[in-house]
Image: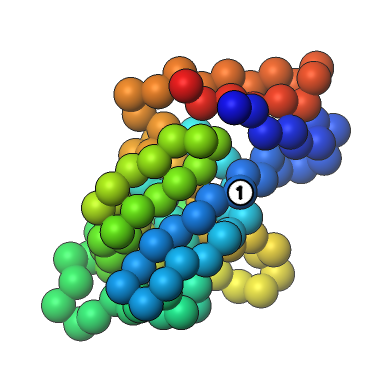
Amino acid sequence: MSESFRASHGLIFVSVEVFGSQGSAVLRPALDTGATRTMINTEHLIVIGCAPNHDAEKVKVTTGSGVEFAPLVKLQRVVALSQERVDLPVLAHTLPPTAGIDGLLGLDFLRDYKLEIDFRQGRLSLS
C-alpha cells in the first residue's frame, strides 16, 4: 500500500498509529531517513500510557540545536505504511509547538523494508 504526499511542500508526513498500555493514537510524524531512531513527542506517549520514567535508558541525540539526551520508551506496536513493528523502542522528546510535527519516523522502523519515494507522483510505499 502507498501513501500520498505533497512533493512540492516541505516535509513528508506519514500516518502512524502507536500503541501503548492505555490505548493508541494516530500521529503525523515526518519521514526522516537521516534519523537513526524514531522519535515521538512525549505528550503523545503519555496519553497512550508510555510516559518515560526516571530509570529509562537515555540516548545521546544530535539535533539542529545541539546534543541532548532523550529517554527510550518501548511501544507495544507501531504501524505505518501498512507495516508493523512490535516492541519498538522510540525516543521520547518534547518538541516545540512551532515544530508542527508529532515526531520523526526513522530508520529503525524502515530497516528490512523496501522504501520507495516517488516525488513525481507524490507517492510513498514501504514493502
Q: Is residue 3 left or right of residue 68?
A: right
Name of the residue lying farthest toward the right: 8
Amino acid type, callout 1: Ser
Of the pair 35 and 20, the residue shown nearer to us? 20
Of the pair 117 and 75, the residue shown nearer to us? 75
**Colour scheme of the picture:** rainbow
Q: Which residue is mark 1?
A: 15
Of the pair 26 and 31, the residue shown nearer to us? 26
Within 10 angstroms of label 1, few (less than 14), some, or many (20 or more) residues? some
Q: Is residue 7 left or right of residue 12?
A: right
Can the viewer see residue 116?
yes
| x then y, percent, for residue 75 | 31, 60
Can the viewer see residue 32?
no
| x then y, percent, for residue 1 | 59, 27
Q: Examine the rendered structure and indicate whether residue 88 appears above or below residue 51.
A: above
Q: Examine the rendered structure and indicate whether residue 69 appears above or below residue 80.
A: below
Q: Image point 28% across, 65% down: which residue? A: 73
| x then y, percent, for residue 105 | 49, 46
| x then y, percent, for residue 39 | 43, 56
Q: Quadrant of residue 20?
A: bottom left
Q: Is residue 34 left or right of residue 69?
A: right
Q: Image point 63% across, 22% down: which residue? A: 117
Label 1 residue SS: loop
Q: Tally the numbered discs.
A: 1
Q: Image point 46% across, 79% down: which residue? A: 47
Name of the residue lying farthest toward the left: 55
Q: Image point 44% across, 36% down: which residue? A: 83
